[in-house]
Amino acid sequence: MTNVSKAEINDLCEKLLAKNSEYSEREENIENKISQLNASSTKVRSQLISERKSHSESHHALEAKYTAEIQSLKSEIKTLKRKATLAQKASSADKVQILSLETKIRELEGKLEDIDLERTYHDLDVMGGVVEEPAQISSSNPKEINSLRLELEQVKEDRNLKEYTIECMEKEIESSNSIFRQEIDALYSARTKLREENRAFKDQLALKKNTSSQIISSEGIPLELGGAEAVPLSQEILLAPAIPVVASSLMSLMITYSMLALLLIVVIWLVVRKWWNP
């Protein structure tokens, strides 16, 4: 009876040692998992910080670029408006000059008609200073008539040139205004798109942070008790906010196993002591 009881005690001790060895192995696995989770947490946090920093730098660079281009275009538009105002003033002056030339044309045409009809002497007083000389014209001097006709043709050419210049200036101003409006619209559109992308990125980060704990609780940790498996990067990003909670749970479990093992050892030691020393 005594031998059987001692055998049972020895068997119980062996089982306890085996159980303790199993607990030690599990404790080692848990420590490995905690180390891996801490490393993953550090890696993911570093990646998130780097990604946010890169996005922030890119956003500020693009924002500065678009702002500078918009300010430059605004300055060019102001310059163009000033030029347009000056051109309009010049155009108005040219139009006044055209009216003066037309008046001069009518005057010269009238003088030619008077010369052809009356063949008398007239003083030529042409407005604007183009022609200002007295002319003694007679029926026997057609040279003066030809001179007046040449002057008339020259005045007409000057008028046509002024009209063409005004037309070209107006077309150039209209074309420049259209181009600058298109560039301004494109830059404002790009700036709006950049702000929308930045807002979407912030929303995505907030969504990842809010849903990570739910994903952890529904899917569990992708690690086996017998060893550690590799965690994909996409899952690491989702697991990052919950890693401290998981590590704390594993530490609590490890401490519980250790306490149970110590309790069993104390119980067996008391039983053996009582058996050998009744």
Image: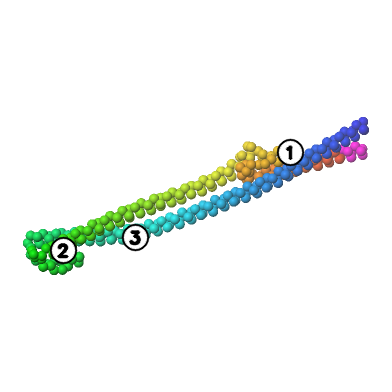
Q: Is residue 192 above or below residue 21?
A: below
* Picture residue at 13% right of the left edge, 62% below the top: 145
The answer to whether residue 222 shows anywhere in this view is yes
Q: Residue 226 bears which disc, if any? A: 1
Closer mark to the observer between disc 2 and disc 1: 2
* Picture residue at 73% right of the left edge, 42% below the top: 30
Determine crowd level at label 1: few under 14, some 14-19, many 20+ residues with C-alpha closer than 10 A. few
Alpha carbon of mark 3 to alpha carbon of mark 1: how far?
Answer: 80 Å
Upstream in the sequence, badge 2 or badge 1? 2
Residue 95 counted in the magenta span: no
Q: Which residues are magenta?
A: 271-278
Residue 220 lies left or right of residue 14; in this view the side is: left
Alpha carbon of mark 2 to alpha carbon of mark 1: how far?
Answer: 117 Å
Residue 97 lies left or right of residue 256; in this view the side is: left
- Residue 161 coordinates in the image, percent (x, y): 25, 58
Q: Residue 147 bears which disc, if any? A: 2
Q: Amino acid at mark 1?
A: Gly
- Disc 2 is placed on an element classified as helix
Q: Is residue 218 above or below residue 77?
A: above
Q: Amino acid at mark 2?
A: Ser
Residue 188 lies left or right of residue 97; in this view the side is: right
Name the residue that disc number 3 marks. Answer: 82
